[in-house]
Image: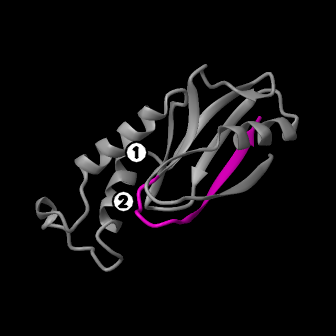
Amino acid sequence: MPQTIISLSTRGSGLYEFTGEAAAFVRRTGVEEGLLTVFVRHTSCSLLIQENADPDVKRDLDRFFKRLVPRSDDPSMGWIVHTAEGPDDMPAHIKAALTQVSIGIPVADGRPMLGTWQGLYLFEHRDRPHRREIVLHLGG
């Protein structure tokens, strides 16, 4: 079963598209039909399939999650205990718990069966830049 790890560098919170890298991996395998499993190896970021046509969607999603789960130095988050790694860390874990760290995408005709406006994104929940590893596995 073909498998690879891709590395993405983030510049802080937000959505980082890697649809092209995932599609290129599927093409290189030569597998025509199967299931692409995408898994991120971290607990403070997550994965999304989301619209990739209008950049406002990415900005709005990032802003929504910042409002939903503010940094731990926000007065509304005074209940948070885990603060050793900074005020963005525990909120990042909560955001990752609300989203997903693994996605399955059907593959047909040697390509991921994403819709016309769908893109595959790493959703970085930390404020600082990070290097993230994403495992791509193609099962037949």
Nearer to the camera, 11 or 5: 11
- Please report whichever mark, 2 or 1, sits nearer to the chain's N-terminal start: 2
- Residue furthest bottom as drawn: 84
Helix, strand or loop status at disc 2: helix
Residue 132 screen position, x and y as percent? 58, 61
The amino acid on which the numbered mark 1 sits, given as a three-letter code, is Thr
Confirm whether the magenta stretch covers residue 73: no
Q: Residue 35 occupies which quadrant of the picture?
A: top right
**Residue 131: % across, % down:** 59, 65
**Image point (45%, 46%), residue name:** 100
Report the front residue among 117 and 136: 117
Rendered-image quadrant of the C terminus: top right
> In this picture, which residue range is highlighted in magenta?
124-140
Tell me if residue 111 comes above or below residue 66 in the rendering: above
**Left or right side of 114 for 78:** left
Q: Which residue is mark 1?
A: 99
Residue 92 is tagged as 2
- Amino acid type at image mark 2: Ala
Which residue lies at the image location 48% right of the left edge and 34% below the top edge? 55
Residue 125 at x, y = what percent? 41, 56
